[in-house]
């Protein structure tokens, strides 16, 4: 049975790159079971395929995933590049922190990419953003597709890995990929002047193969991410600055809100944890609890 990887899924078809290098169009039929749950194949999945009499491909088996993201939907990735624009749309820390939690939950390597540096008037603002995230261990690359800033650095961070580009609509994900894959014709879209948001130009997830080795997926921009299926005590693990401190909290199940002798709150008060990041932690925790109240009765 030939094996391959799904590199694209559109309107009822999966496109599979087989080990022999053939690209096979497969009808998206069926739901597969493993580990007692049903799975729908995702881009990035390693699958077994067979051809029917008409020469059309059929996915017969989805092999176990080493990682998976649901927003954007993709499997078997190593690294997430979280793309945020500095301007147009304006930098927003909340969606960034939200996506970081998702990528942490999946144990992905993370790289933050701040785009559209050419639209910035004050470099100090960018330095401030960088210092917050670098202090907790995230590598950051600042880019501009106009000046070329950061593009080679970004390219070398992708070599040999399977990377997903994720971020809100209009931040410039596809523009970066167009630079990386000049031979492809990818569609980018202007940011709406009226509402200052992207127009959801990219509609599908697609894995492209890097000449230097590795793969990169462009994905549609998303606007909201919910923390479905996360338990309140799992959230702290997804914040590096909380994860590295909570062994020092007095209580084992400390949620770092109002428990006594909480090492995390002490660090917030001492100015060692960024107050906005902590505020986001509190807000996400409320969302997770609210979700649990509504769905687990
Ligand atoms: N000034 C400036 N504009 C940029 C830069 N990168 C991208 N843009 C512009 O930003 C707009 C949106 O870019 P896209 O690459 O389509 O954004 P996207 O993140 O792929 O958006 P979706 O596909 O909707 O999720 C386009 O008009 C780009 O030309 C940059 O470095 N500087
Ligand atoms: Mg796009
Ligand atoms: Zn605590």
Image (cartoon, rainbow, N blue to C red):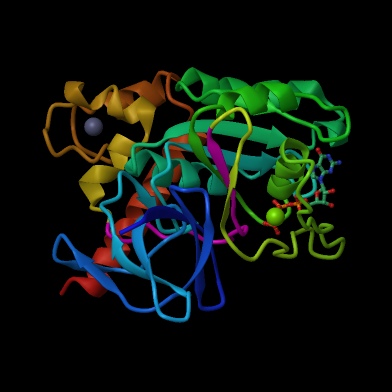
The residue lying at 43 percent from left, 19 percent from top is: 272
Q: Quadrant of residue 81?
A: top right
Whether the magenta-drawn stretch holds residue 228 is answered as: yes
Q: Position of residue 162 (x, y in %)?
A: 48, 38
In the displayed structure, would residue 154 be above or below residue 278?
above
Q: Position of residue 179 (x, y in %)?
A: 77, 38
Q: Quadrant of residue 180?
A: top right
In the displayed structure, would residue 164 be above or below residue 266?
below
In the displayed structure, would residue 61 be above or below residue 272?
below
Question: Is 265 positioned to the left or the right of 153 in the image?
Answer: left
In the displayed structure, would residue 139 be above or below residue 33?
above
Regarding residue 68, the answer to whether it shows in the image is: yes
Where does ligand 3 appear, by image quarter?
top left
Q: Is residue 250 or residue 145 the one in the foreground?
A: 145
What is the tally of numbered marks visible in this picture? 0
The residue lying at 38 percent from left, 65 percent from top is: 41
Whether the magenta-drawn stretch holds residue 210 is answered as: no
Q: Quadrant of residue 108?
A: top left
Regarding residue 45, the answer to whether it shows in the image is: no
Q: Is residue 159 or residue 194 the one in the foreground?
A: 159
The residue lying at 11 percent from left, 33 percent from top is: 252
Question: Is 292 positioned to the left or the right of 29 in the image?
Answer: left
Question: Is 24 positioned to the left or the right of 51 in the image?
Answer: right
Q: Which residues are magenta?
A: 214-229
Q: Position of residue 120 (x, y in %)?
A: 84, 32
Quadrant for the N terminus, please. bottom left
């Amino acid at each position: 049975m030939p094996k391959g990887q799904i590199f694209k899924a559109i309107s009822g078809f999966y496109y599979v790159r087989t080990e022999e290098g053939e690209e096979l169009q497969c009808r998206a039929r069926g739901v597969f079971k493993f580990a007692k749950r049903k799975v729908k194949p995702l881009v990035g999945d390693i699958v077994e395929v067979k051809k029917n009499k008409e020469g059309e491909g059929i996915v017969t088996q989805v092999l176990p995933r080493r990682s998976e993201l649901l927003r954007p939907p993709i499997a078997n990735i190593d690294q997430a590049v979280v793309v945020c624009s500095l301007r147009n749309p304006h930098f927003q820390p909340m969606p960034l922190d939200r996506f970081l939690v998702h990528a942490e939950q999946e144990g992905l390597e993370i790289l933050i990419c701040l785009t559209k540096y050419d639209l910035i008037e004050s470099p100090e603002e960018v330095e401030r953003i960088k210092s917050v995230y670098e202090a907790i261990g995230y590598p950051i690359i600042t880019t501009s597709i106009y000046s070329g800033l950061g593009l080679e650095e970004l390219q070398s961070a992708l070599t040999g890995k399977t990377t997903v580009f994720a971020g809100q609509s209009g931040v410039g994900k596809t523009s970066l990929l167009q630079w990386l894959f000049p031979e492809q014709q990818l569609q980018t879209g202007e940011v709406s002047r009226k509402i200052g948001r992207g127009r959801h130009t990219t509609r599908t997830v697609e894995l492209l193969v890097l000449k230097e080795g590795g793969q990169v997926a462009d994905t549609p921009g998303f606007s909201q991410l919910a923390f479905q299926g996360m338990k309140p005590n799992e959230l702290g693990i997804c914040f590096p600055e909380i994860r590295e401190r909570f062994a020092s909290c007095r209580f084992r199940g400390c949620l770092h809100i109002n428990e006594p002798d909480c090492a995390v709150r002490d660090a917030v008060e001492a100015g060692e944890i960024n107050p906005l990041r902590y505020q986001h932690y509190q807000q996400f925790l409320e969302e997770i609890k609210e979700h649990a109240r509504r769905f687990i009765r």
